Image (spheres, rainbow, N blue to C red):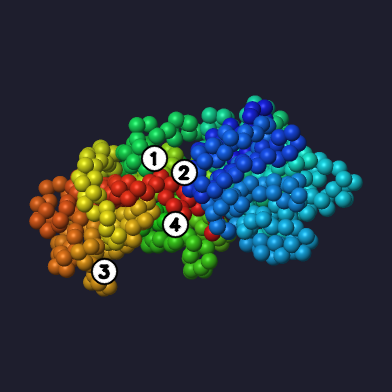
Amino acid sequence: MCGIIGYIGHQEAQNILLDGLHRLEYRGYDSAGIVVMHEGELALRKKAGRVPELSQLVAERPVTGTLGIGHTRWATHGEVNDANSHPHFGGEGEVCLVHNGVIENYTSLRDALQEKGYEFKTETDSEAVAHLLAYEYREQLGKNGSVADATSCLNALQATLKQLKGTYGLVVLFRDVPNTMFVARVGSPLVIGIGNKEHFVASDAGPLLGHTDEVVYLSDNELAVITADDLKIVHRDTGAIDPKVQIIEQSDGNADLGDYEHYMLKEIYEQPRAVENALRGRFNDDEATAVFGGLNMTAQQLRRIDRIVLTACGTSWHAGLVGEYLLEEFARVPTEVEYASELRYRNPPMSENTMIFAITQSGETADTLAAMRECKRKGHPTLAICNVVGSTIAREADGGIYLHAGPEIGVASTKAFTSQVTVLTLLALFFGRMRHLSYPAGKRIIRGLQSIPELMEQTLKCHEMVKYVAEKYSEKNNFLYLGRLYNFPVALEGALKLKEISYIHAEGYPAAEMKHGPLALVDKNTPSVFVVPKCGIYPKVISNLEEVKARKGPVIAIACHGDEKIAELADDVIYVPDVEEYLQPLITSIPLQLLSYHIALLRNCNVDRPRNLAKSVTVE
């Protein structure tokens, strides 16, 4: 993986491809390249490094043509270098492709192709697909009396796909058929944009904004044959199908940086509005409950649910952990949070009345998608909490809830986390009112949620204090993050943010677990970040904090305004508004996001595109 762009039409392809690759930079990558059909040949420009470096190469060696493909690579097989960058050629240059995904049987394919005389120039699994496609293409030409046309190419592609094990999003060009682009997908997202006598292909809708608002989301096992004037889609098993055209809802301007230096900072400051959007239209004041339009289950079916499993990865898993606490407290429904990467391979006992919620920002996370599919296969109602309209998980789930947070460009998730927690709070209210939660309690939760956007705005005023703390501790190489109950997941998320973008080792724990091992890590060079707002076990957390202080560990505290006791104990205090415990993750996570952001800046790290990470992890 990571990003794909393709174009066929009447405009210069290289400009559209480079612009598309620039828009795909947020996904994380280590090299980039394009191929343009030029005077009957496939002209290649690729380079390890960033898209601006590729743009410079293209400026020095421009190519003209109205058909081309491009790719930003996040290495899975083979080191980062020019050779392993995409696009890749097959045979003697008659085939060229870009590929997202992982081909699990590439080693055996490679061995068989080498025996047939094919020479490999890279370490990638993708080159095996290119050579196999070239081989099958030659086989087709032999059958058809050396006729090179779209039918021969499609047949060769279908014969190739039957031999692949793994996941792929493929866009393919054939040198001998210069007016056609071929696309195939299993497990790796692809979207086709429809323009005026032109078509686009991309790994997500972002690169298509400003070019077209009409798209077709390719589903698994579907292939597309695309010319400037025509789009045909074929299912591997059932044959030709009618494309389902949808309208992109987000605007191109949503992805602009505006006055912010980085997307991460912009998205931190967008959280009040993101939460407001997640709440909009989802309250029923008369019945003191939440309203969802997309669960696609009757009230009777929902009341029969006796267990909820939340499955997710990374930041979404942390949001799910908050959701577990919320659902069990307010709805009294036994709830578990499963890492999707583990759930997909486990066989836990689940009754027929177990509901599955897949939590994902992108809607394309490979592990989450596979876990959801496995649960769906076993007959469980599978719903999604997702941000991206039209994503695979959103389309395949039985129902679900959109975040409406707008595009999140920074690799380190911020506004998606708080939006997910907001939706999970609404969900706990919804199930609670359906079961045991009283009317006054429901009204109190609604009022609390309605106050959050304004309280988030107030929380952001801690920014200058966070900058001061970041400057004080930015050279430390180990951090501990500690919280209890609702703030334990916040501690986990704070530690993850620091790891993601500053490359500092950080661990999150329930504060009471310090004495069961982690306390051995405490010394004067290991700051401990305590998330300690007012709560029912505040004295217990203070006791844990004092254990760290007794061992000369520096303490940074996230505490409520007016807490004078914490000022006497902690080395540094970042104050936030006082809210009820179940709402605290929406507030206490913000200073931790800002802390990781400023420490990363001080360490000269790439905040929006941290090393080795991708925004949407579409491979296992």
Q: Which residue is mark 1?
A: 263
Residue 545 position, x and y percent, is: 17, 63
* Mark 3 vs mark 2, CA separation in Å: 35 Å
Q: Which residue is mark 4?
A: 313
Instruction: Find residue 548 and report its image quarter.
Output: bottom left
Q: Secondary structure at mark 2?
A: helix
Asked whether residue 117 is in view, the answer is yes
Q: Residue at x 82, y 51 (%)?
A: 138
Query: Crowding near pointer 4: few (<14 within 10 Å), some, many (20+)?
Result: many
Query: Crowding near pointer 2: few (<14 within 10 Å), some, many (20+)?
Result: many
* Mark 4 vs mark 2, CA separation in Å: 19 Å
Residue 425 position, x and y percent, is: 34, 49
Of 570 and 124, the residue lying toward us = 124
Q: Which residue is mark 2?
A: 26
Viewed as shown, does residue 228 lie left or right of 193? right
Q: Secondary structure at mark 1?
A: helix
Q: Disc 3, disc 1: CB below 8 Å?
A: no
Q: Residue at x 52, y 41 (%)?
A: 53
Viewed as shown, does residue 427 lie left or right of 377? left
Residue 74, compared with residue 226, is above or below; it is below
* Mark 3 vs mark 4, CA separation in Å: 27 Å
Of marks 1 and 4, which one's residue comes earlier in the chain? 1
Q: Residue at x 19, y 60 (%)?
A: 554
Of marks 3 and 1, which one's residue comes earlier in the chain? 1
Q: What kind of residue is marked 2? A: Tyr
Q: Residue at x 48, y 60 (%)?
A: 340
Q: Disc 2, disc 1: CB below 8 Å?
A: yes
Q: What kind of residue is marked 4? A: Cys
Q: Which residue is mark 3?
A: 521
* Mark 1 vs mark 4, CA separation in Å: 22 Å
